[in-house]
């Protein structure tokens, strides 16, 4: 077994978010000297379950194995169907991590450094389009670069968020949103704090606000009595133009091809 290759793969698994629990299975499969093999992984994000199949293939010109792609399937607790997508490990597609894959499958966007076909680096938001599929059965991955016009920091800064007043917390908030997370924040209004959750939607150039129970706040929705009307106005950020994300049900798309 090529020890250097094994160490490289274990580090790749770790930094892609699959941890260190697959090392033994990885070694067993490499020692079998098969041209290709798969490993299975399961985890939970909150109440949601993620199942992944990781694909490894040996080079036709050496004994090196490569971790080229993984298929993740999201099973949300409050829904009776699953959604799957193949994520490829290369600079053109952004080297998506497991947590980022979860966020994408859950309808959110992630901000990645990408490599164009001409070999130039650029930054873009990635977001799945659940209404369109590619020939291999994947969902279409939309790219929103700087020319698209979504300025995350400007959009978030328009909200009365307490964490924005501290440089460290501000940086952490922006970094979390760029990874596609739905982030807890505190809104300030007349000296009082109110807990909300926010996420960004580059497709609609918007920040989406959720209440403390993670129910989406709509324009004109009646808020709790103790929340001031000024705060109510502040959270109306294009929410009337953003449709609910409908995760496809079985039978509404082609099967995944490997």
Image (cartoon, helix red, strand yellow):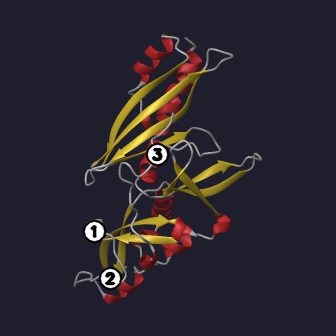
**Above or below 254: residue 39:** above
Labelled pair 1, 2 in contact (Cβ < 8 Å): no
C-alpha separation, residue under disc 3 versus residue under disc 1: 37 Å
Q: Position of residue 103 (x, y in %)?
A: 43, 52
Between 252 and 167, the residue placed more toward the observer is: 252
Asked if marks 3 and 1 touch (Cβ < 8 Å), the reply is no
Q: Secondary structure at mark 2?
A: loop
Q: Looking at the image, which residue is at 38% across and 56% down? A: 247
Closer mark to the observer between disc 3 and disc 1: 3
Q: Nearer the viewer, mark 3 or mark 2?
A: 3
Which one is in front, 165 or 145?
A: 145
- Disc 1 to disc 2, C-alpha distance: 18 Å
Work out which quarter of the rendered image holds the N terminus and state it: top right
Q: Is 174 above or below relative to 229?
A: above
Residue of label 2: 191
Say whether disc 3 or disc 1 marks the residue closer to the N-terminus.
1
Q: Secondary structure at mark 1?
A: loop
The residue that appears at 54% across and 41% down in the rendered structure is 136
Nearer to me, 190 or 3: 3
Q: Pinpoint residue 168: horizontal percent, then vertical percent.
A: 48, 61
Task: Residue 140 in the image: state x and y as whole percent.
Answer: 54, 52
Disc 3 is placed on an element classified as loop
Please, which residue is most extreme toward the left here?
A: 225
Give above or below for 22 relative to 179. Answer: above
Q: Which residue is mark 1?
A: 212
Measured from the top left, where is residue 67 in percent x and y? 55, 29
Q: Residue at x 65, y 64 (%)?
A: 146
Determine the residue located farthest toward the right in the rendered image: 118
User: What residue would you read off at disc 3?
Assistant: 254
Instruction: First in sequence, mark 3 or 2: give its number.
Output: 2
Is residue 190 toward the left or the right of residue 5 in the image?
Answer: left
Query: Label 3, label 2: how many angstroms apart (C-alpha)?
Result: 52 Å
């Amino acid at each position: 077994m090529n020890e250097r290759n094994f160490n490289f793969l274990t580090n790749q698994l770790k930094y892609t978010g699959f941890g260190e629990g697959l090392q033994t299975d990885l070694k067993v499969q490499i020692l079998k000297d098969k041209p290709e093999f798969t490993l299975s992984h399961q985890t939970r994000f909150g109440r949601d379950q993620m199942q992944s199949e990781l694909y490894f293939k040996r080079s036709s010109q050496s004994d090196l194995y490569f971790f080229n792609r993984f298929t993740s399937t999201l099973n949300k607790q409050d829904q009776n169907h699953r959604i799957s997508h193949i994520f490829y490990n290369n600079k053109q597609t952004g080297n998506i991590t497991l947590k980022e894959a979860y966020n994408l499958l859950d309808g959110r966007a992630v901000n990645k450094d990408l490599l164009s076909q001409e070999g130039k680096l650029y930054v873009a938001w990635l977001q799945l389009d659940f209404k369109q599929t590619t020939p291999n059965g994947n969902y279409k991955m939309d790219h929103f670069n700087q020319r698209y016009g979504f300025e995350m920091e400007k959009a978030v800064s328009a909200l009365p968020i307490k964490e924005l007043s501290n440089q460290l917390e501000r940086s952490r908030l922006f970094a979390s949103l760029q990874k596609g997370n739905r982030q807890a924040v505190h809104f300030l209004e007349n000296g009082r704090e109110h807990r909300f959750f926010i996420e960004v939607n580059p497709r609609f150039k918007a920040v989406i606000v959720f209440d403390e129970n993670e129910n989406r706040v709509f324009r004109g929705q009646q808020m709790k009595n103790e929340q001031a009307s000024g705060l109510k106005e502040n959270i109306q950020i294009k929410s009337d133009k953003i449709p609910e994300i409908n995760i496809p049900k079985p039978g509404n798309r082609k099967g995944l091809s490997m």
